[in-house]
Amino acid sequence: MKMTSDVRGISILEVLVAIAIFLMVSAGTMEIFMWGFRGRDIVWEQLSTQNEGRKIVQDFVNQLRRAGQSAVGGYAIESADNQQIVFYSNIDMEAWRERLRYFLVGTTLKVGITRATGTPVSYNLEDEVVTEIVHDVANTTTPLFYYYDENYTGVTNTTMSAPIDTTEVRLVGIKLLLEEKPNVAPAPFAIETKVSIRNLKTN
């Protein structure tokens, strides 16, 4: 009996199928790597934004804690609302307190500094120097600042109602929401604290 063997080679169709499978596997692997890199970048960007936010909040706390009467005799807190606060504090240890204005514009938190100058001394608001200090702020509908009077005990979270009577403010809260990339990042990161103004304490 004559034996025969199948000596057929690999067909073109089989080669094309193998190539297609290889390309799909390669593309999938590459996509996984790309997602990994993008995820890592998002995490690092979020951490950078959070660290920036923590530093700014700590600066704000230190400045507001030392708030006091202005160089012209004005009250320690000039104005206060949900997205802006104006107060006087000595940030450079010179003779007069500076006028500090923290305010939110869109997704950017800014601070304006006006120094007391001249004789007689005054605050020329045209000389205000404004600096952008935090980006990616997500306080669109959430108040950035909130206020408490001397009746606040820490047990309940009852804030003062607008319009704020600045002469009644004894404690100021800040809740800074940060979101580097709203479309891909997790929920906004919240930095929240309260600061008591030393020179306004009544007990």
Image (tube, rainbow, N blue to C red):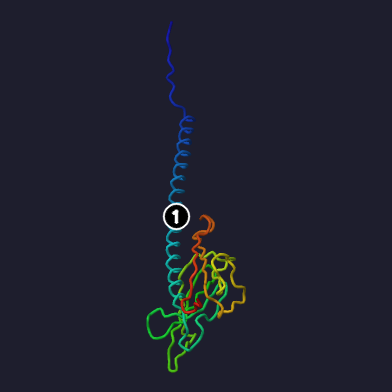
Task: Give the image location of residue 168, x and y in percent.
Answer: 56, 78
Residue drawn at 52 percent across, 66 percent down: 175
Q: Which residue is mark 1?
A: 43
Give the residue at the far bottom of this rendering: 119
Q: How many marks?
A: 1
- Quadrant in the picture for the N terminus: top left
Task: Give the image location of residue 189, x and y in percent.
Answer: 50, 59
Task: Give the image location of residue 118, x and y in percent.
Answer: 43, 92
The vertical placement of 7 against 93, above or below, is above
Residue drawn at 49 percent across, 88 percent down: 73
Residue drawn at 41 percent across, 85 percent down: 96
Mark 1 Cα shell of 10 Å, populated few (<14), some (14-19), many (≥20): some
The vertical placement of 115 against 143, above or below, is below
Q: Amino acid at mark 1?
A: Val
Nearest the eye: 105 or 103: 103
Instruction: Kindly state the secondary structure of the residue where label 1 is placed.
Output: helix
Nearest the eye: 138 or 182: 138
Give the residue at the far front of this rendering: 203
Nearest the eye: 22 or 159: 159
Nearest the eye: 36 or 186: 186
The vertical placement of 7 against 32, above or below, is above
Give the residue at the far left of this rendering: 93
The vertical placement of 137 against 30, above or below, is below
197 displayed left or right of 162: left
Task: Give the image location of residue 150, x and y in percent.
Answer: 55, 74
Give the residue at the far right of this rendering: 162
